[in-house]
Amino acid sequence: MGSDIVLRLVAEHGPWVLLVFYLLWRDVQKDMATRAVLDKNSAILIEITTIIRERLPAGRGR
């Protein structure tokens, strides 16, 4: 079913349709990679913050 739609679009509108789908797919991949890096950085910052709070004297951290 999916390949039939792609073939019909290419036949009707030309090969630039494939380029548009490819560029959209690459954009989604880049977005997912960026989100993964941001999630990892957030986890690291949370760990660092926890370590710093644990090492501060009880009255000064809050």
Image: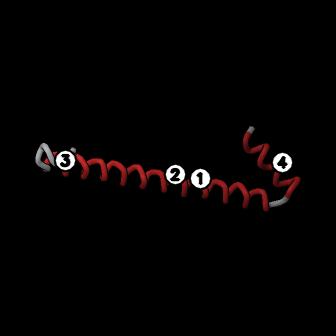
Q: Mark 3 sits on what residue?
A: 61
Crowding at label 4, few (<14), some or many (≥20) Cα neighbours within 10 Å? few
Q: Amino acid at mark 2?
A: Met
Q: Secondary structure at mark 2?
A: helix
**Location of the C terminus (image quadrant):** top left
- Give percent across and percent down for residue 15: 79, 61
Measure the C-alpha gap from mark 2 to mark 4.
Answer: 29 Å
- Give percent across and percent down for residue 7: 80, 49
Residue 16 falls in image quadrant:
bottom right
The nearer-to-camera label among 3 and 2 is: 3
* Residue 8's disc number: 4
The tag earlier along the polypeptide, 3 or 1, is: 1
Residue at 30% over, 52% down: 44
Question: Is the Cβ of the residue at disc 1 closer than 8 Å to that at disc 2?
Answer: yes
The tag earlier along the polypeptide, 4 or 3, is: 4
Question: Is the Cβ of the residue at disc 3 closer than 8 Å to that at disc 1?
Answer: no
Q: Secondary structure at mark 4?
A: helix
Question: Is the Cβ of the residue at disc 4 closer than 8 Å to that at disc 1?
Answer: no
Question: Is the Cβ of the residue at disc 2 closer than 8 Å to that at disc 4?
Answer: no
Measure the C-alpha gap from mark 1 to mark 2.
Answer: 6 Å
